[in-house]
Amino acid sequence: MSSSVDAHETARPAGDATQDDPLLIIVMGVSGCGKSTLGANLAAALSLPFLDADDLHPPSNVQKMSDGIPLTDADRAPWLVRVRDEAARAVETDAHGVVIACSALKEAYRAVLRGERIAVAEAPDEDEAAILRTAREAHPDAHPAAGAAGVPDEKHPAEHALRTYFVHPHGPRDVLLARMSHRKEHFMKASMLDSQLATLEDPTTTGEQNVVPVSIEHSPEEQRDSALEQLRQLAAIP
């Protein structure tokens, strides 16, 4: 058996979600793009609960970002698993769905959030099984991926199939930088913007499905309305 851990085996694969399944909307993008504002506005418009993934980072991640140190994929692995888990738990109490603001910069991160996998590798030759173990140690409730050696099969909230859509507010670097520079209380420093932009794998260019782009140069109301209209066109919402 390969040491790579890719599949997230569940009772019903995440990709098999149907229109009867709860809705997960993830508002993604680099810091300063307005994820939290847009996410909260969408949640209010759809009468869904809203979660901010920044609130789910472990203290070690917050400390690194406060010190201006970019997170590694190994740092993000348990956090991404926890975000997906919290989405699944949210729909246990609200069957309609949930909206989450989460950077989700890489395609592999978004695969975790879709429930397709729970390990991400920093480099192609990195041992994903080791990262998986790290993720489970930091977040022991994480559901095992297919074939994860030494990890027993178990029931888990992530077995929920969620209809997952990504809303991506994006725009020019100078607009993002200006916004970040005015956020005095946030742990993410403006100096880290270029690192985030370099990490970003634009979901509109990767062939991913169920992606909704919106411009950050529009007003919050225009962004909300644009996202809602595109979600309707994708049959995500009535």
Image: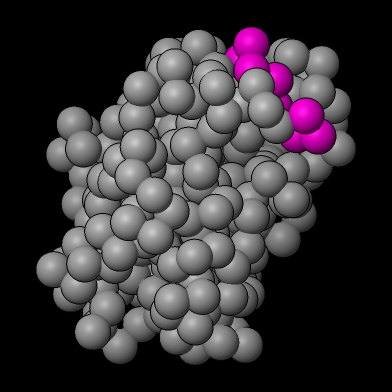
**Residue 176 in sight from this viewpoint:** yes
Q: Quadrant of residue 130?
A: top right
Q: Position of residue 16 (x, y in %)?
A: 26, 71
- Compared to residue 195, the image places residue 115 above or below, namely below
Front residue of 152 and 143: 143
Instruction: Where is residue 38? Give x, y as percent.
Output: 47, 55
Q: Is residue 191 magenta?
A: yes
Residue 62 percent coordinates (x, y): 80, 32
Q: Does the magenta stretch include residue 148?
A: no
Q: In the rendered view, does 85 fall on the left or right side of 138?
A: left
Question: From the viewer's perspective, is residue 203 above or below residue 151?
Answer: above
- Quadrant assignment for the C terminus: bottom left
Tell me the chief SS of the magenta region: loop
Please provide the residue range marked out in magenta: 184-192
Q: Is residue 220 left or right of residue 78?
A: left
Q: Closest to the observer: 49 or 149? A: 49
Frontmost residue, 213 versus 8: 213
